[in-house]
Image: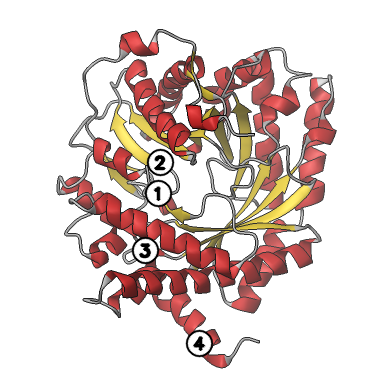
């Protein structure tokens, strides 16, 4: 039973501490849509999305009204399109038509974003995979809601360095496509190592082939709630600190569990997972970096930052798994630069660098996220940054990602405005020493020895 004290506590979290359900995401399998005729394939995809997600927006709004909990986004994730389109697509341009169909369907049902314009190429690329990747710049620049992800590596298979090299080139092409808008379309593309099948967060959401026909996944976020809780134990030892984070994460996850169950009931779609990720926004008080400062750092990036982030991430997960039997996705702390005012402040103060962010990604949920870099950065340098991040995920048996934004026409010292939840970001300096010979070798970095477990 829920008592009145718990109701009041949740209300205070919503009203004062920026607690929200960041997304209700419907995962939809498109495998039944496969057809060798491109026109028929697009028709099948549109009808399938419309049939499953037609009530997504209205159900989200109904839950918001009845429970008083903000639901920021309603989203859709579909089967990786490289798998779905392989039989019908003969060129990258053919794949672009599928992106445009996804975009029209998402707009029609009122979804904010749709993910799954994706390829899984950690060991090698099929012709369909390569065509989809080549189509990404045009697909994302001609649609408004479509998000793309490419899984380049895994602990079991190693790192596909041919695909890593290609993604550095694709990212610069995408940046050029939207150079008149500060290369903003790059924020809709992310590369992964060990991408999860049930992630509700964009740009990396796709509906994995191990999933059911349709599923409801919910992403809940509460960095402001955690910070407010830690303010009440200021000066206490680390044991008290850890217990406070864990108990707070439990409460936040229960909110997500309630919303997920209700959305599942109203939509008639099975509940999948709750993703408890401390995903910040540009709003004051809704910052993961501010939590690190409350723990005792002057700025995120100061000595001790990686240890503090490791502790935060671990306690968040421990609290979350006690609150729901099905915690999944990414779950932990996000450290995007542009979406977190505290991270922006740390960059501007000179407290944090790209290299320090990379170290922090060893212990957080995702990786190098929403980082603006100079537009004249070489493709091979971008590929080298991606390769480093993939290696961290591969060796540490965790999900890592990179969402980099090379802003054409801007350099270090400039700032780029993305707007809304995406905020703004200072352009961060990139190591200018060359990795050309390494990236141009091609081939695959083998899986680490500890991957051989059966």
Location of residue 320 with respect to 40 vertically, above or below: below
Whether pointer 2 and pointer 3 mark residues with C-beta atoms closer than 8 Å, the reply is: no
Assign a secondary structure to mark 2: loop
Bin the neighbour count of mark 3 within 10 Å (Cα to Cα): few under 14, some 14-19, many 20 and up: many
Q: Are marks 2 and 4 in contact (CB under 8 Å)?
A: no
Q: Is residue 155 visible?
A: no
Query: Who comes first in sequence, dot 1 or dot 3?
Result: 3
Numbered circle sitting on residue 364: 1
In front here: 332 or 339?
332
Mark sitting earlier along the chain (2/3): 3
Looking at the rendered structure, which numbered label has been put on residue 367? 2
- In the rendered image of this protein, does residue 33 appear above or below residue 122? below
Q: For the residues marked 2 and 3, what is the alpha-carbon distance in whole angstroms? A: 19 Å
Q: Are marks 1 and 3 in contact (CB under 8 Å)?
A: no
Relative to 136, is 87 on the left or the right? right
Relative to 118, is 385 on the left or the right? Answer: left
Report the front residue among 107 and 398: 398
In the rendered structure, find residue 8 and report the number of the disc placed on it.
Answer: 4
Whole-number angstrom distance, CA of label 2 to CA of label 1: 7 Å
Instruction: Identify the residue at image location x=25%, y=52%.
Output: 305
Q: Which mark is residue 40?
A: none
Answer yes or no: do the residues labelled 2 and 1 have beta carbons within 8 Å?
yes
Please report whichever mark, 4 or 1, sits nearer to the chain's N-terminal start: 4
* Mark 1 closeness class: few <14, some 14–19, many ≥20 residues within 10 Å: many
Disc with the residue nearer the chain's start (2 vs 4) = 4
Residue indicated by mark 3: 286
């Amino acid at each position: 039973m829920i008592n009145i004290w718990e109701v009041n506590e949740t209300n205070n979290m919503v009203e004062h501490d920026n607690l929200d359900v960041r997304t209700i995401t419907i995962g939809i399998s498109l495998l039944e849509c496969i057809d060798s005729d491109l026109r028929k394939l697009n028709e099948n995809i549109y009808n399938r999305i419309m049939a499953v997600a037609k009530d997504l927006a209205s159900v989200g709004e109904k839950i918001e009204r009845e429970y008083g909990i903000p639901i920021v986004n309603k989203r859709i994730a579909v089967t990786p399109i490289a798998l779905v389109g392989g039989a019908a697509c003969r060129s990258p341009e053919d794949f672009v038509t599928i992106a445009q169909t996804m975009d029209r369907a998402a707009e029609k049902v009122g979804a904010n974003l749709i993910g799954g314009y994706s390829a899984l190429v950690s060991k090698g690329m099929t012709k369909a995979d390569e065509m989809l990747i080549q189509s990404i710049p045009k697909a994302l620049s001609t649609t408004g809601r479509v998000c793309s992800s490419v899984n380049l590596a895994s602990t079991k298979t190693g790192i596909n360095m041919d695909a890593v090299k290609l993604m550095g080139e694709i990212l610069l092409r995408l940046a050029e496509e939207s150079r008149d808008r500060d290369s903003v379309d790059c924020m809709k593309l992310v590369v992964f190592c060990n991408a999860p099948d049930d992630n509700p967060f964009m740009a990396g959401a796709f509906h994995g082939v191990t999933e059911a026909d349709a599923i409801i996944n919910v992403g809940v976020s509460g960095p402001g709630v955690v910070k407010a809780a830690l303010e009440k134990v200021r000066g206490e030892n680390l044991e008290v600190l850890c217990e406070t984070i864990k108990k707070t994460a439990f409460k936040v996850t229960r909110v997500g569990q309630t919303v997920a169950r209700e959305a599942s009931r109203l939509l008639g779609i099975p509940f999948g997972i709750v993703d408890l990720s401390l995903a910040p926004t540009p709003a004051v008080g809704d910052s993961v970096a501010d939590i690190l400062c409350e723990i005792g750092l002057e700025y995120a990036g100061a000595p001790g930052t990686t240890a503090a982030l490791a502790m935060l991430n671990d306690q968040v997960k421990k609290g979350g798994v006690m609150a729901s039997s099905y915690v999944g996705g990414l779950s932990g702390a996000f450290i995007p630069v542009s979406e977190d005012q505290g991270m922006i402040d740390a960059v501007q103060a000179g407290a944090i660098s790209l290299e320090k962010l990379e170290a922090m990604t060893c212990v957080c949920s995702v990786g190098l996220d929403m980082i603006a870099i100079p537009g004249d950065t070489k493709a091979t340098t971008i590929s080298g940054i991606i390769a480093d991040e993939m290696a961290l995920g591969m060796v540490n048996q965790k999900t890592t990602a990179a969402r980099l934004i090379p802003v054409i026409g801007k350099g270090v010292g400039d700032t780029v405005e993305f707007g809304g939840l995406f905020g703004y970001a200072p352009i961060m300096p990139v190591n200018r020493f060359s990795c050309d010979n390494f990236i141009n070798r091609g081939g695959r970095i083998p899986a680490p020895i500890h991957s051989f477990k059966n």
